[in-house]
Amino acid sequence: MTAFAFGITIGSFLNVVIWRLPRGKSLVYPSSSFCPNCEHSLRAIDLVPLLSFLIQGRKCRYCEKPISWRYFGVELLTGLTFLAITFQFWQTPTNCVTLLLFSAILIPIFFIDLDTFTIPTSLNLFVFFIPLVRDGIGILQHEPNHVLLAGWCPRSFLGAVVGIAIFGFIRVIGWVWKRQEAMGLGDVLLARGMGAFLIAFAPIGSPPLYHFMTWILLCCLSGAVVGPLMILWRQRGQKQKKAPIEEPEEENEQEYPESNSNFGEQIGAIIYCLLLGDLVEYLLDLTIAALKNAKQGVGYIIRERCIKLREHWGGHVDEDEEEFVVAPTAIPFGPFMVLGFLFTVFFGEWMAHAYLSYAFPPK
């Protein structure tokens, strides 16, 4: 139960991440949590995971406005996830701790992408660097699952490249077919981190990409099953909010134009992922923000050069963010990637073994 208690506590913080990060607010300031409706600072009695929500009748103690069930759900989901990971992987403490940290990043990605159809760059970078650090520790400790491939390449690098290649291919094929963005670049970057992580879970003596087919299959299956239900739910909500006077059909058809990008730009976006373009942009943005008050001197020169470099780099992740309009039939794929990854971690070994036993029965 220690893992569950720790999980619901972390889940309370993840609620802060889910609410603040898409709105561009700091996770550090203000240091105390506050009600999103009345913005009153919350006290310790208001922040007891799960219990405060239930005892207060799903209402804020100060403005008495209802609190979304999501806050309770995120805390409970995080607690159950931490409990399941600890139960299954406690015999390998390093993998267990790494997976706990990794899942703590995946949960806000799930809900933020569900709401905004975007994945914050900072979270995608965390998802990428966690398995890299884990792989580095394994290499230094000469662990069997963390040997250098061909004597020089860390396994996590191979997993990241394969993850980008698979979902980048889906993105490009979708553009060729529909001339529209079939998969966001944030999803491709998320696949980079998941691929780097999954390669470490391959059983000793098995091919490094042992779990990848299971992962892809589960991602697609979860999207195929849940995706249509999400579309129907959104369309139903839009019909309820729609005004009685309808716009002309011609204008509605122009609301979701085809992408203006070309095939070269689509390939360039995949190369951008391989070259860690999001990391470059993130570091440039941090530098620009840190030196925003510099009016002269070295700080001013560095900031101006960073601004120019940021403009010339491409800005694939944030491109046309203000003009982004979600089509009625669009669904965010990030949540299904998260589900597919977690199911693969828990059941991938069993599924792969069952399939191989069926396809190649022992004689």
Image (cartoon, rainbow, N blue to C red):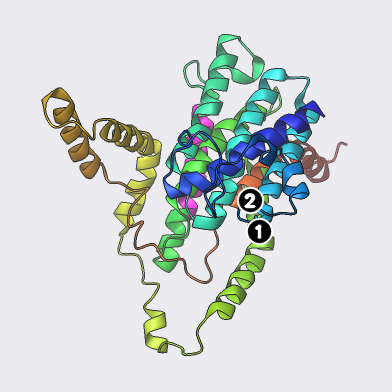
**Identity of the amino acid at label 2?**
Cys
Q: Position of residue 96 (x, y in %)?
A: 70, 25
Q: Which residues are magenta?
A: 157-170
| Magenta stretch, overall SS | helix
As displayed, is residue 198 above or below residue 333?
A: above
Task: From the image, tell me which residue sits under label 1.
Answer: 66
- Residue contact at pointers 1 and 2, CB within 8 angstroms: no
**Identity of the amino acid at label 1?**
Pro
Asked which quadrant contains residue 205, the reply is top right
Disc on the earlier residue, 1 or 2:
1
In the image, what residue occupies the spot 72% across and 48% down? Answer: 53
Residue 38 in view, yes or no? yes
Closer to the eye: label 1 or 2: 1
Quadrant showing the C terminus: top right
Relative to 323, 132 lies left or right: right
Residue 207 in view, yes or no? no
Task: Looking at the picture, tell me which residue is in the foreground, 241 or 135.
Answer: 241
Task: Looking at the picture, tell me which residue is in the foreground, 44 or 311.
Answer: 44
Q: Residues within 10 Å of mark 2 (few under 14, many from 20)?
A: many
As displayed, is residue 207 above or below residue 359?
A: above
Task: From the image, tell me which residue sits under label 2.
Answer: 219
Task: Looking at the picture, tell me which residue is in the foreground, 350 or 86.
Answer: 86
* SS at mark 1 in the image: loop
Q: CA distance from mark 1 to mark 2?
A: 34 Å
Quadrant showing the N terminus: top right
